[in-house]
């Protein structure tokens, strides 16, 4: 993760960690079938249904955002570069253009293989750590 963040730091400063998180969401969605038996489309549908079923319990900010999230199917759109580009643009707007996140898709395309390798390494370490912790319970 540090390698990915370092690659983005010059252009995105302290927002580089946020950008990496979003880019890694892309690789998780893109490679979902390696990590979960339920197809991503069905998983996302189930998640949106769970949000709707528990709407009253959600923070007001999430309640306001939900219709947009579902209408544009944000979670499924993470699997595509255009979808990530749209998410980065929306995030940049939320911070009033200070992050330049909307341009991070340029680095994503330029260093796509490197980011994907770094994600895979990070995620495999995370999975191993979680399995180890679960085994001690």
Image (cartoon, rainbow, N blue to C red):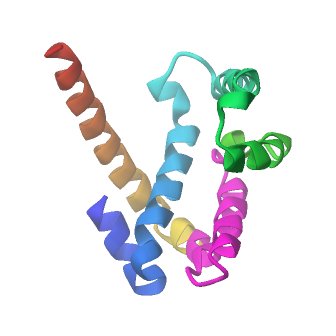
* Residue at 60%, 69% in the rendered image: 105
Give the quarter of the image for residue 48.
Answer: top right
State the residue lying farthest toward the left: 136
Where does the image place residue 123, in percent across and percent down from the top left?
34, 40
- Image quarter of residue 9: bottom left
- Does residue 73 appear left or right of residue 84 in this picture? right
Q: Is residue 114 left or right of residue 49?
A: left
Q: Quadrant of the N terminus?
A: bottom left
Q: Where's residue 67, x and y in %?
A: 83, 43
Q: Tell me the residue at 67%/70% (across/down).
A: 94
Q: Which stretch is magenta?
A: 77-105
Type of secondary structure dominating the magenta stretch: helix
Number of callouts: 0
Left or right of 95? Residue 60 is right
Nearest the viewer among 4 and 15 is 15
Residue beneath the point at 28% across and 37% down: 126
Q: Quick check: is 99 in the magenta stretch?
A: yes
């Amino acid at each position: 993760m540090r390698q990915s963040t370092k690659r983005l730091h010059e252009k995105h400063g302290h927002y580089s960690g946020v950008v990496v998180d979003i880019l890694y969401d892309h690789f998780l969605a893109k490679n979902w079938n390696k990590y979960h038996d339920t197809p991503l489309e069905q998983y996302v549908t189930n998640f949106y249904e769970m949000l709707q079923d528990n709407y009253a319990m959600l923070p007001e900010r999430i309640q306001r955002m939900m219709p947009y999230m579902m209408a544009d199917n944000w979670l499924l759109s993470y699997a595509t570069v255009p979808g990530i580009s749209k998410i980065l643009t929306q995030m940049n707007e939320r911070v009033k253009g200070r992050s330049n996140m909307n341009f991070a898709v340029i680095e994503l395309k330029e260093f796509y293989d490197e980011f994907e390798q770094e994600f895979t390494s990070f995620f495999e370490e995370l999975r191993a750590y979680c399995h180890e912790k679960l085994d001690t319970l």
